[in-house]
Image (cartoon, rainbow, N blue to C red):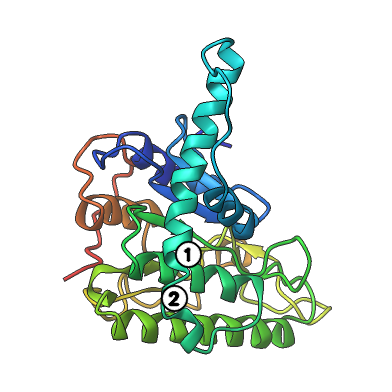
Amino acid sequence: VPAVGWLGRYADGSRTAGGIVGVSFGDDSAQALVSSTDRTERIAHPGTLLELARNPPSTGTPDALPQLAFLGGVEARLRSLGGDFERATAGSGSRHEYPDTAFGASLRWTADLIETGSTCRTFHASLGSFEGGPSFDTHLDQRRTHDALYAELEAALAAFARQLLAARRWEDTLVMTYSDFGRQVAENKTGGTDHGDAGLMFLAGGRVLAGVHGGMPDLTETPGGGLAPTVDFRSVYRSVLRDWLGDDRAVRPKTSSPDHPVTI
């Protein structure tokens, strides 16, 4: 597993003025946002950040020990991010019908942060993780599990889009979904499917180039039981870094696959 994720590398070298560039919601750190600096942060409980922002800073002599200076820097960074979350409470998310789930709450916070002018550039939310609730790792009972997960995804993204359209921020937003693994084509004996190579990526936003990119997969070609990929996912990452995030540096995923423009 790489020590730094592709969005983490972007955050490390971001030209955005100081502060946190990427936020992931949940108990587990998103590998894509793992960075070698302090410019990304995992937020398990936004309420804790709000408490930090609403209380006076710690007192003392942080220069007395290197450890105290380090902790003082962590507190200052989190306090600044807490200010973003405090301002986000004035967003319009409460007027939209987000699912009453962890994923729904993550997208609502994200939309509120974007609407109220947070300087963060990337946000990561997980749906169907292994930590409680249904997972997309559907080795059994896939139809019922997918029905529930995609209904939650649909409802959350619809509310997210409605909020940002009303706030006139949809043109400034790119949504990208991905999975850690694909699925095989044939159903197994327990009503599910096993791991495969290819999967889907959905992109949405006010400036997304609509349509199917890379062509439909050939259902007669199933190497190892899965679909053969028609697009190298790293070329999509590269396009997002260059065309959307404006990262023209060479520290992007390396692939010989042609780029697939994702925005107009």
What residue does disc 2 label? 218
Residue 224 rendering spot, x and y as whole percentages: 61, 61
Q: Earlier in the sequence, mark 2 or mark 1?
A: 2
Residue 210 location (% of width, % of height): 26, 80
Q: Which image quarter: residue 214?
A: bottom left
Up-down relation of residue 11 to residue 240 (above or below): above
Instruction: Residue 205 in the image: state x and y as whole percent.
Output: 30, 75
- Which residue is the extreme one toward the right? 190
Q: Is residue 221 visible?
A: no
Give the residue type that dot 2 points to.
Asp
Q: Say whether residue 189 is left or right of residue 64.
A: right
Q: Whole-percent x and y of residue 225?
A: 62, 67
Task: Tell me the residue at 27%/74% (across/down).
Answer: 169
Which residue is disc 1 drawn over?
A: 228
Amino acid type indicated by mark 1: Ala
Q: Height in image: 181 above or below 111?
A: above
Determine if residue 165 is in view: yes
Please state, as top left, top right, bottom left or bottom right, where the N terminus lies in the image: top right
Do tag 2 and tag 1 residues touch (Cβ < 8 Å)?
A: yes
**Front-most of 39 and 143?**
39
For the residue carrying disc 2, how many other residues have a C-alpha within 10 Å: few (<14), some (14-19), or many (20+)? Answer: few
Measure how far apart labels 2 and 1 are at the Cα level.
Answer: 7 Å
Foreground of the two, 253 or 28: 28
Which residue: 19% across, 42% down? Answer: 248
